[in-house]
Amino acid sequence: MDQIFPFNLPVPTAWYAVLYVVTLLLHIVFMSYVLAGSIMLGIAGFRGMLGSKAKPSDWSAVTTILKDWMPFALSAAITAGIAPLLFVQILYQQEFYTANLLSFHRWMAILPVLIVAFYLLYLLKAHRIEGKTALQGIVAMLVTACILFVGWSWVENHLLSLNRAAWPAQYEAQAMVYKDPAILPRLGFWIASSLPTACFLLAWQLRAGASGVAVESAKRATRPLAWLAIISVIVAAAAAWPVIRGVLPAAGAPASEIGIRIGMAIAGFGFLLQLAGWLPALSGKPVGKALLSLASGGAALFWLGILMSRETARLSVIGSEAIFARHERVGTVAGFVIFLTFAVIGLGTISWIVRSTSRALRIQK
Amino acid sequence: MTDPVVSGLISYPINDFGPAMKGMVIGGLGIFHVFLAQFAIGGGMLMAYFQWLAMKGKEPAARTVLDSYFKYLVLVSFVTGAVTGVAMWFTSIQISPGTIGKMVDVFHWVWATEWIFFWVEVVAGYAFYRYSKILSDRTRLTLLITYSIAGLGSLFWINGILSWQLTPGEWVKSGNIWQGFFNPTFWPSLFYRTIACMVIAGLVAAVIVNTMPALSREDRTRLINRTARFMLPIVLMPLFGLWFLAAMPDDSRAWVMGGSIAMTLFMNIAVGASVLIGGYIVVGLWRQKLYINGATATLLLALAFGASAGGEFVREGVRKPYTIRTVLYSNSIAPEQVAYLREVGCTTGDPFPLRDAASIPNPQLQLGALTFRNQCAVCHTVSGVNGLTHLIGNWETDQQRLNIAKLQWTKGFMPPFAGTPQELEGLVQYIKWETAKRPATWLESRDERVFGQIRAWLDEAGTAPATAGPRRPEVSAMNIPGGGR
């Protein structure tokens, strides 16, 4: 089979890996908003900063937007998650299915937990509890707990899928919880990485005056948002290498090492761009379109590099001739042209919807 | 043995759902999800109709209903409907990873295309939900039509995959996925489901209209009668139902026509409930222009849920003994793997140990427990729902051996047994031991003549399923002196 340099992968495997990474990137945009947003809301709720009776703070504009947009973001995150979920089943079918089966009810629990989180988010924006700060705080913290549970479950599932040697004992013990010292640092990495992404999304929303946020209130939120983005992106960058490298066997996988390093270099470039985008905002000046675009592009490159490295590492751990042969067989199935055609039509339709509603909003303003 | 046969054998850990049959889990969730998804699709169409009525001045109260209805649509279908959709994938993995894996392998581009439709549905739906009040009538209508087309499109794509499971058509020979997608039951199933969407959405509207204090009794009556018009295509349901029946494989049709009492019963529940709903809509709501209150509307909606449940049960059931007809049996064993597994054993490559091995008194019973797990557990429990101790526990030992060895001929909707004579004997002993309430000691049956007889029966039965044709093997004279318990 032809190998694609520098990732040392056959063409069909690389093709599905690319599709997986691209669609996962889209999912990560919304997932980051939900994960980081739920943490921000949880902290704000804990500190009594939610609701109409709460004292205004620098974060008021952010929490107003989050309360308004989190239900949609969760819906979008789930919808965006379908495609990477599809491609992960092609790339790592046996590993993904086995990890799901081993975690059984514990894994399946993420579904009702997501439904609960959804309804709690709608409850959070209900007028009926707008004036009840304590109740809003409890609801927000419950949302945080639900989303963190889902995040923890995904990390656990991922690590279990990589550890084939642990499967029989895990099954025999009926252990629905997989214990691995890598879970916490990995979850920490995901949380840290999601924060700068959510920050740039929120900054765009602040600029656009989303959820009726006043200009002055939006200005006040920019500086703390920049601080949060800078600190979290530094933490994420520091954690990235050990987290990615940690899944490889001690002896390493020399053939894929270069692919992992290229991914890390792209992530490093993204890290620098994010810093360049956010640092000027520390002075308290409003973040312009150009700087925000820089931070946004930086976040995208950071994630792209991380995902490239992660998939290269994963395929170097579990990739085998049998798996590559399966990808080749599956790769012969027709339907890509139909998908592409409808993707173009779908994108056009979505653009039209966004344009129409934006125009209506402008007219209203 | 060819490589593809062997390489297709992947051992997954098999979970135990206690006394519940796995089919109940996926079936229960499936019915719930299908009902919500159909509500979402039909709801979009109904709202587009109401928007048109409002724009044309044909129904002044339609606009009032629109916003209220859409709130329910978002809260119920966007949330629970979307998550249960993902749950269907996850539950399918829990029940039959081999089946869902095969479906993903064959139809991943179709699913990816459906994903695009989901996106359009979500964006159009949310745009209407958030901004409908500031949008022009024309834009509102276009949004609702877009939402409806996206919803119907998602039904179109998933319908091709689901109907392919029962009637894969020419795909089996050609491997052309479009021949599998546009299979013999594709169109009747699509039309039938589209009408079901419209009826469910209409009945939900009848419930919601009754919860709105802003509407007068006259408004409600008019709106319900308008909704009845929208639901009128229900009169075509029998036609599409019959078309679906005619397009089914002969053996599948035989199950619902009396061959399997459970399937016949469920089909009659679906038909009976649909007739009642259809009768009420056509005679009461459309012809006589009656008003129905919230309680009656809810009752009709519950009947519609019953009809959906019956229909989905039948759709799942008639595939037996396959999950993908002619390609994969219910227990995820492919027909071409049966002969191979009869030689090497179905438990040989299973890397997952027995969880309760310590409580099982001898190795033969342990082998039987493993055989049960690999061959039977997907549809049967030991002593719970559809439990083997209830079904065959009181059979004589030789009767059990013979009937399991010739399983596909014992019951036409069972797959052929795919294991060695030792595994079959282990299974028989395991069922007897479980029927005897798991005593602390149990003698092994190691009579070579028994294994020889089982082998002979397996050979007589052959490896082909009963669905392959009317062939019935000769039953040999039983000759097992002192064989077994």
Image (cartoon, coloured by chain):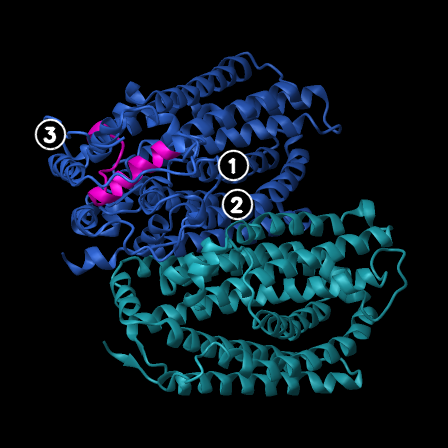
Chain colours: A cyan, B blue
Examine the rendered structure and indicate whether residue A311 appears above or below residue B257. Answer: below
Which label lies toward us, 3 or 1? 3
Return the disc, 1 or 2, that comes first in the chain's sequence. 1
Q: Residues within 10 Å of mark 3 (few under 14, many from 20)?
A: few
Asked whether the viewer can see residue A364, the reply is no
Residue designated by label 3: B473
Question: Residue A123: percent from the left, percent from the top?
Answer: 74, 48
Return the disc, 3 or 1, that comes first in the chain's sequence. 1
Given the image, on which type of amino acid does mark 1 rest? Phe
Residue B268 quadrant: top left
Q: Give the residue displayed 65% in from the left and 87% down from the top.
A: A276
Given the image, on which type of amino acid does mark 3 rest? Pro
Task: Please tell me which residue lies in front, A227 or B316.
Answer: B316
Q: Give the residue displayed 30% in from the left and 39% down from the top.
A: B427
Residue designated by label 2: B84
Asked whether the viewer can see residue B196, the reply is yes
Pointer 1 with pointer 2, Cβ within 8 A: yes
State the mark number for residue A242: none
Q: Residues within 10 Å of mark 2 (few under 14, many from 20)?
A: many
Q: Which residues are magenta?
A: B409-433
Q: Are marks 3 and 1 on the same chain?
A: yes
Given the image, on which type of amino acid does mark 2 rest? Thr
